Amino acid sequence: MVLVDADGSYCAEMPSSIRRSILFLSGARLILNTTHRFVYPFLPAIARGLGVPLEQAALLISVRHFAGLATPATNNLVGQGERRRRLITTGLALFIAGCAVTALSGVYVGALVGFAFLGLAKPVFDVSSQAYISDRVPYERRARYLASFEFTWSISLLVGAPLTGWLISKTDWATPFWVFGLIGAAAVLMLPRFVEADNRHAPAETPSSGLGRPALAFLVVVGLFTMAAEIIFVVFAAWLENSFAVSVAVLGGAAFLIAAAELAGEGGTFAFTDRIGKRRAVMVGLVVSMAGYGALSFASSNMAAGLALIGLAMFGFEFTIVSSFPLASELVPASRGRYLGWLVFALGVGRGIGAALGPALYSSFDLAGAAVAAMAANALALSVIATQLRDDQENVK
């Protein structure tokens, strides 16, 4: 893989050890992401398999979400010594446990426990992998490396979820958990060949005595723009059904649009974030999302225009969030893994608040009201990053 430097010239080929590590970690993350995302479209099949109503099955997603908020505590407890590799292994082990408990039990209570393991597994794996890559990549090129790792998020919905649906149609709801758990076990066995121990490259992290104002401010920024996206994401299907009485096929097409917008946002990060600077890229993404939300508040009565604007907003959101990871990776470099854990916590809080606000705003003010609230949250996030973080904190040249 050849990368383009910030000035447009070609830089040296990625070192083979880093390339191998990123390919391995990306493959493992594709499995974790697919397990995470296939649940949404196939939740009715899971509910039938467990013999519970859909509303009760939806609590599986809530449990998974809240379990992820324990990521900072897990990182502090486990992330010592060979911090990155130990945490990557821990994330995979939690993932295997979650898949096994969910598939083995075949009952609702067992699935709740299994989904709690899965909810903790993904952020632990993600954070430790991002920190591992950041340790080994110069800051001026880091967005490209992290963006290549993030491509697995959109691919998991575009490719992984349909393949999982085919697997469920041929067998039953539990089979994907068996398959993905076995792949996770194989990844643990192969991990020492691809993921180096941290002590070859980086000193042990030192516990942070406290986060500085820029680091704390950026957690607020992340929570705000994540809340904004979730406000729209949780109600767009209801908007389509209630306003236009669309079919399931149209809803599937809308999900594909979201995944395509995510893929474009990740590609934008890969192509531009290192060139224009991480802080500036986050601000650009916030403005793009704001434009989408703002226009959506006037176009919610038109399905085609509304879907296009939701796609624009989700493109801006994905560009923002993927650009946030390299920026965050250098805000507290002495405690990089711990700070990225707090970043995941902020993401979870933002999603939780947005998921609660979205339906209430939609019920009271329709999609236009939800879009105005999302635009306001992004505007506040933009003002915080503009006043609390400076370009010289990220060495923009």
Image (cartoon, helix red, strand yellow):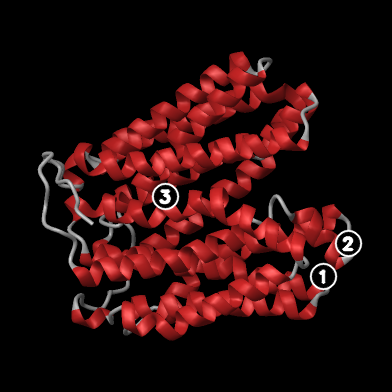
| Sooner in the amino-acid sequence: mark 3 or mark 1 | 1
Tell me the CA gap for discs 3 and 2. Answer: 37 Å
- State which mark lies toward you, 3 or 1: 1
Residue at (62%, 73%) from the top-left corner? 179
**Badge 3 or badge 2: first in the primary sequence:** 2
Q: Establish if 251 lies above or below 349.
A: above
Q: Nearer the viewer, residue 170 or 301?
A: 170
Task: Tell me the kind of residue under disc 3.
Answer: Leu
Q: In the image, residue 10 lies at what x, y percent? A: 12, 47
Query: Circle 1 — which element?
Result: helix
Expressed as whole percent of the image width and height from the top left, the position of residue 275 reads 20, 39
Above-or-below relation of 211 to 264: below
Which residue does the numbered mark 3 point to in the structure image?
A: 219
Q: Nearer the viewer, residue 129 or 21?
A: 21
Question: Which of the 4 image quadrants contains residue 79?
Answer: bottom left
Disc number placed over residue 108 in the picture, else none: 1
Determine the residue positioned at 80% across, 73% down: 109
Q: Are marks 1 and 2 in contact (CB under 8 Å)?
A: yes
Dot 1 amino acid type: Tyr
* Alpha carbon distance from label 1 to label 2: 8 Å
Q: Circle 3 — which element?
A: helix
The amino acid sitting under disc 2 is: Val
User: Residue sitting at 28 percent across and 79 percent down?
Assistant: 196
Gap in Å between the C-alphas at discs 3 and 1? 35 Å
Residue position for label 2 = 52
293 and 74: which is toward the camera: 293
